[in-house]
Amino acid sequence: MKKLVLLFLVSACFMAMMLQAALPQATVTSPNGGEILYKDGEYTITWNCSNCAGNVNVIVEIYNTEHSGPGYHGQISPGGVPMSQGFFKWLAVGKLKDGSYLNPDSGYKIHLEAVDGSDASDGTFSIRVMLRKIVITRLDLHRLPNCPECVRIDLKPLLENFKNCQHVYRISLFANDLPVADLGEFGGQKRMHDFIDARLGQPLQVQAQNRRGRFELRLFNRQGQLLQTQPVQLGL
């Protein structure tokens, strides 16, 4: 009798192990530790999948091992992602499903949640803020009638450069190391007009026309710190 009971228990354990082994399982492969991701960048979260036949979904989440609370954990997939797909393209704009915004920090892990189990990154990775840079090298100016020193500056290239940018920056036009026009703030919910009127003395206009002056666009953060100096030509 004891042998029968022992045999039954062994058989039951073996069957349970076989059943468990047959369940769909996903294992995070990237990011899996040590990476640096930047907000506003697009990344592909990947995982290996075993026994993934059928319609099995996985929820993709992010959490921080060092901090808790809003902005440090939450769901990043809009809903269930097919586990057999093996990846999820994530635009790291920072907004989580609970409405909070992801905080740049270290100590993050990706977590996959499924009905039959879960898995997380083996190590932690960091999320940092990607600083925008001015990429244009020319600004077009148009003279205004009845005002020899007045010009209209075409800002459309800058607006294109800084669209869909969460962080706010201020840009100023400098001539020979002196500020001559504040072009306003860009990013976040702030959007400037396509053009801005400014005063640019006739000597500077002559220098711009003859390409002799030293003109620069300077990029500042919201706190007034200088982030970039970009030489530009002024087209009149």
Image: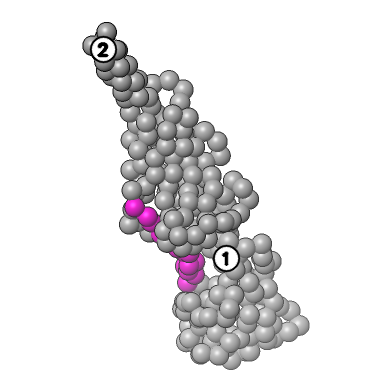
Q: Main secondary structure of the magenta part?
A: loop
**Image x and y of residue 49, in percent:** 35, 31
Q: Where are the magenta residues, as a range?
A: 123-137
Residue 213 higher or lower than 133, as above or below: below
- 128 magenta-colored: yes
Q: Which mark is residue 2?
A: 2
Residue 80 higher or lower than 134, as above or below: above
* Residue 216 visible in the current orientation: yes
At 37% from the left edge and 31% from the top edge, which residue is drawn?
25
Q: Quadrant of the C terminus?
A: bottom right
**Image x and y of residue 165, in percent:** 56, 61
Q: Quadrant of the N terminus?
A: top left
Residue 38 higher or lower than 84, as above or below: below
Mark closest to the chain's N terminus, 1 or 2 = 2
At 46% from the left edge and 63% from the top edge, which residue is drawn?
105
**Image x and y of residue 198, in percent:** 67, 80
Q: Residues within 10 Å of mark 1 (few under 14, many from 20)?
A: some
Q: CA distance from mark 1 to mark 2?
A: 72 Å
Determine which residue is flagged by label 1.
167
Q: Nearer the viewer, residue 57 or 206?
A: 57
Q: Nearer the viewer, residue 130 or 194?
A: 130
